[in-house]
Image: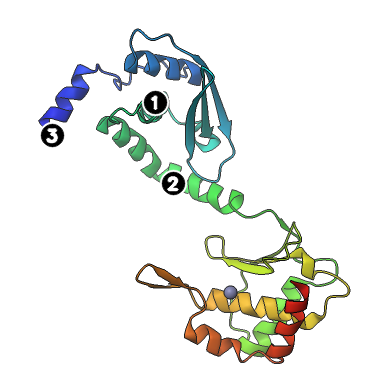
Amino acid sequence: MLHSVAMHAASGPVLAAQYEVSSLPEQIYARVFRLLKPGKPVPEIHVVFRKYANAKAQIQLKAGVLHVKISDTLAVAPDEVQGALAEILLSKLFRLRVPVECQAVYRRYLNRKDVRQDLDQVRRTRGRKHLADPAGEFYNLTQLFDELNFTYFFGLMARPTLGWSRQASRTMLGHYDPTHHTIVLSKILDREDMPKLAVEYVMYHEMLHLRHPVEHKGNRRCVHTATFKEEEKRFAQLAEAKKLLRKLV
Ligand SMILES: [Zn+2]
């Protein structure tokens, strides 16, 4: 413990919060670079803020240029935090020990209540798959959900976010995304010549996913549990619906 503290002290007060107010990100990275690699020429540095769904950051040294991509959610972070992140990223890039202080500063920032709330908000809105209107062209997912909810679940299932996928996938006809509490159906089903039974079945199947969370047995994920399969049998014309889908895929 003492040893690691001493090591960090020896490498200089990198995280001394001495960054001036609102340094350019490039300046921050250049400064940290000089501290970690004294005597080495500072490369050209590009820092861009990207619209990631979380507090993500990446660093790469390519053809002598240092490329840094940081989530724009971190763009407003104080210089001290930017500096800590710079030191974390550059230390990792150069395979150096990441100073505990940097990690602490960065983590403390991410744990700040206002920051956490902002990140949650961003995750909720951005992480959402780009969905098309549930009203669709031929099938209205909201209506379909409500009908199935009434028929099979006594109308008791809270409606999640619903949407048609933008791409007409043949391999993934539907999926339930628990993070965003969203049921997505492949646009390929929103066609005039698509029997309603097929669309209903896919929706019903995804509704069951919402109802039956994935079970973990050891390190195996069981998505279609025995109870899931049992409940799926309640669907009227199950065999016929499956046949329709088999023809499609
Ligand atoms: Zn499934």
**Gap between marks 3 and 2 measured at Cα:** 30 Å
Q: Position of residue 183 (x, y in %)?
A: 63, 68
Q: Nearer the viewer, mark 1 or mark 2?
A: 1
Query: Mark 3 is on which residue type?
Result: Met
Extreme residue in the left direction: 2
Q: Position of residue 95 (x, y in %)?
A: 33, 29
Residue drawn at x 55%, y 35% is 72
Please tell me which residue lies in front, 98 or 134.
Answer: 98
* Residue identified by numbered label 1: 90
Residue 31 in the image: above or below residue 189: above
Assign the N terminus to one quadrant of the image.
top left
Residue 158: mark: none
Please tell me which residue lies in front, 222 or 103.
Answer: 222
Position of residue 11 in the picture relative to residue 194 (left or right): left
For label 3, the crowd category at 10 Å Cα-Cα, with few meaning under 14, some 14 to 19 and many 20 or more, is few
Quadrant in which residue 2 is drawn: top left
Instruction: Tell me which image quadrant ligand 1 sits in.
Output: bottom right
Residue 238 in the image: above or below residue 62: below
Colour convention of the picture: rainbow
* Residue identified by numbered label 2: 116
Q: Nearer the viewer, mark 3 or mark 2?
A: 3
**Gap between marks 1 and 3 measured at Cα:** 23 Å
Q: Position of residue 169 (x, y in %)?
A: 73, 62
Residue 1: mark: 3
Quadrant in which residue 155 is drawn: bottom right
